Image: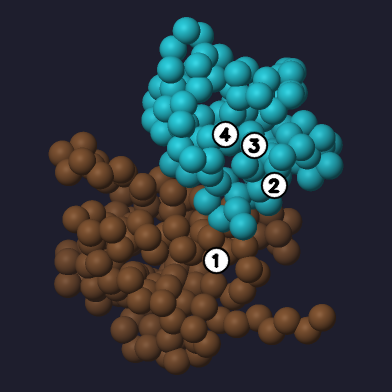
Amino acid sequence: MAIEANGKTFETDEEGYLTNLGEWEPAVAEVMAAEDDLELTDEHWEIINFLREYYEEYQIAPAVRVLTKAVGKKLGKEKGNSKYLYALFPYGPGKQACRFAGLPKPTGCI
Amino acid sequence: MSEQIKKFMYLNRRAPYGTIYAWESLEVVLIGAAFDQDVSLAFLDDGVYQLVKGQDTAEVDMKNFSPTYQALGDYDVTKLFVEKESLEERGLTLDDLMPLTYEDEDDDWAEKDSIKVVSRAELADIMEEQDVMFSF
């Protein structure tokens, strides 16, 4: 599978995750979001960027409960809860946001 | 609902690179952490090399996954036993290992060390207490 963004082709796996996370650019997230009928706001980007930083530091995409806890610590309690994160990413803040961020499927998401 | 919490121990006995065992073990630990069991990890034999700091995999063409051990605390995996004799046999000390910590929710989020060096005899006793063991 593949997606088109910014005039380029990006290869994805069968679940839509980017095959090569080094290729990621913001346009990829925009296109993936549009396919899910979502428009990315600053609040979405805050989480996407947070995930990319988490991956940079730990080399894994965090499971949703780990993400929730880490967001709470870094961005505040009003954001570190399932309600806030699911409102932004209705298909699951772990799976959907990681996909937009160009990361693999979260480790420990079941 | 009365779900019984079991004691799970993951044994890590092999060097981090050259085979897939160490990374596979770490992934299983992170996935298994979702099940709220009493999880501990043991590092012995060449497995102690998995925790050595300053790993550089540029020459061996494998992903350097050592930063991922730092995430174990976030996954509530906070008991990492390292066998003293295995360290000594390889000329290593605790100072050669990555400092790994977790924040103790029951103690006002105080930062605590996850790694505990134990003797071969102590580790044998800890293994004796386990319900389930996974060997990698």
- The residue located at (44%, 22%) in the rendering is A10
Looking at the rendered structure, the kind of residue marked 2 is Lys
Q: CA distance from mark 3 to mark 2?
A: 17 Å
Q: Earlier in the sequence, mark 3 or mark 2?
A: 2
Q: Disc number at residue B32?
A: 1
Q: CA distance from mark 1 to mark 3?
A: 21 Å
Looking at the rendered structure, the kind of residue marked 4 is Arg
Where is residue B106? Give x, y as percent: 73, 64
Where, by quadrant of the figure, is residue B127 drawn? Answer: bottom left
| Mark closer to the observer (2, 4) | 4
**Are both tags, 1 and 3, on one chain?**
no
The chain that hosts pointer 4 is A
| Mark closer to the observer (2, 1) | 1
**Callout 2: helix, strand or loop?**
helix
- The residue located at (25%, 44%) in the rendering is B62
Q: Disc number at residue A96?
A: 3
Q: CA distance from mark 4 to mark 3?
A: 5 Å
The residue beneath circle 2 is: A69
Q: Disc number at residue A99?
A: 4
Chain B is shown in which shade? brown
Do the residues bearing badges 4 and 3 touch, measured as CB atoms within 8 Å? yes
- The residue located at (78%, 84%) in the rendering is B2
**Callout 4: helix, strand or loop?**
helix
